[in-house]
Image: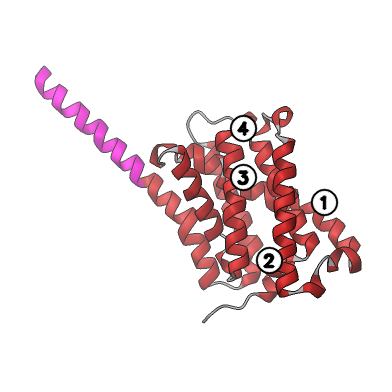
């Protein structure tokens, strides 16, 4: 093969390999962030939520582990840089939004669990950060922004897309309160990870806001037993 032929063949081979890799990454993203949540919301019983969450988390851990240039130690960095002012700010916004929703739709349920089932509220407060917030953050922040970085648009659009997909992942609850709250929560969590470069801060924001959601009574909207599908 002549030098000229090599120069024309090798770039084409490289381009084909790049195209195949990008196609595979798009397929992964579609499976994880679109097909899986839609299938859970439409085709499977609501009580499959946690098994599916753990299965997707396990798959996400494998994919993250094989992601080029990713090291697990990255997830431990940033504890000393957590913006506690931002944590407080999101806590206040979550509390006020939750209060407004509860006063409008179910005032008798406001702080019901805290007053009537304090042991259950304590259990949720202790377990939620590890059972729910942490696995969701792994899948939706480092996996999304690291493994699929080459597919993403600029930072602002990527954060918007991430928040939209995070909201879609909660489609199984079939109510607008969850859709709106998870979208804006997703914006905050994605900002903490991608702009502040701080995974621990994203987990803390998610955990604190989630505990507040249950404390004020919004857990009724996130309870699989209350799901009413529109079909």
* Residue toward you, 44 or 108: 108
Label placed on residue 90: none
Q: Position of residue 185 (x, y in %)?
A: 62, 52
Q: Quadrant of residue 224?
A: bottom right
Do the CB atoms of the residues marked 1 and 4 lie less than 8 Å apart? no
From this view, report whether residue 138 is shown above or below residue 71: below
Find disc 4 in the rendering and name its residue.
72
Mark 4 or mark 2: which is in front? Answer: 2
Earlier-in-chain disc, 3 versus 4: 4
Label placed on residue 126: 1
Range covered by the magenta-colored residues? 1-23
Inter-mark Cα distance, 2 to 1: 17 Å
The N terminus: image quadrant: top left
**Residue 130 visible in the displayed image:** no
Q: Position of residue 177 (x, y in %)?
A: 62, 66
- Going by the image, does 142 lie left or right of 158? right
Earlier-in-chain disc, 1 versus 4: 4
Q: Farthest residue toward the top?
A: 3
Do the CB atoms of the residues marked 2 and 1 lie less than 8 Å apart? no
Find disc 3 in the rendering and name its residue.
189
């Amino acid at each position: 093969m002549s030098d000229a032929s090599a120069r024309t063949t090798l770039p084409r081979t490289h381009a084909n390999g790049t195209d195949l890799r990008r196609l595979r990454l798009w397929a992964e993203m579609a499976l994880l962030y679109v097909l899986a949540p839609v299938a859970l919301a439409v085709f499977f019983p609501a009580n499959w939520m946690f098994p599916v969450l753990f299965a997707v988390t396990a798959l996400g851990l494998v994919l993250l582990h094989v992601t080029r240039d990713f090291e697990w130690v990255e997830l431990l960095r940033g504890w000393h840089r957590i913006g506690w002012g931002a944590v407080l700010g999101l806590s206040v916004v979550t509390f006020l939004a939750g209060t407004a929703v509860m006063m409008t739709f179910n005032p008798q349920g406001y702080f019901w669990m805290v007053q009537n089932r304090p042991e259950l509220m304590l259990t949720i407060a202790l377990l939620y950060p590890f059972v729910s917030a942490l696995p969701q953050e792994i899948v939706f922040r480092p996996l999304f922004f690291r493994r699929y970085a080459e597919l993403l648009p600029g930072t602002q659009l990527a954060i918007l897309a991430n928040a939209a997909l995070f909201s879609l992942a909660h489609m199984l609850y079939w109510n607008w309160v969850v859709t709106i709250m998870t979208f804006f929560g997703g914006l905050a969590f994605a900002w903490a990870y991608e702009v502040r470069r701080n995974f621990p801060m994203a987990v803390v924001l998610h955990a604190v806001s989630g505990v507040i959601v249950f404390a004020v009574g919004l857990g009724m909207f996130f309870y699989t037993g209350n799901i009413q599908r529109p079909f």
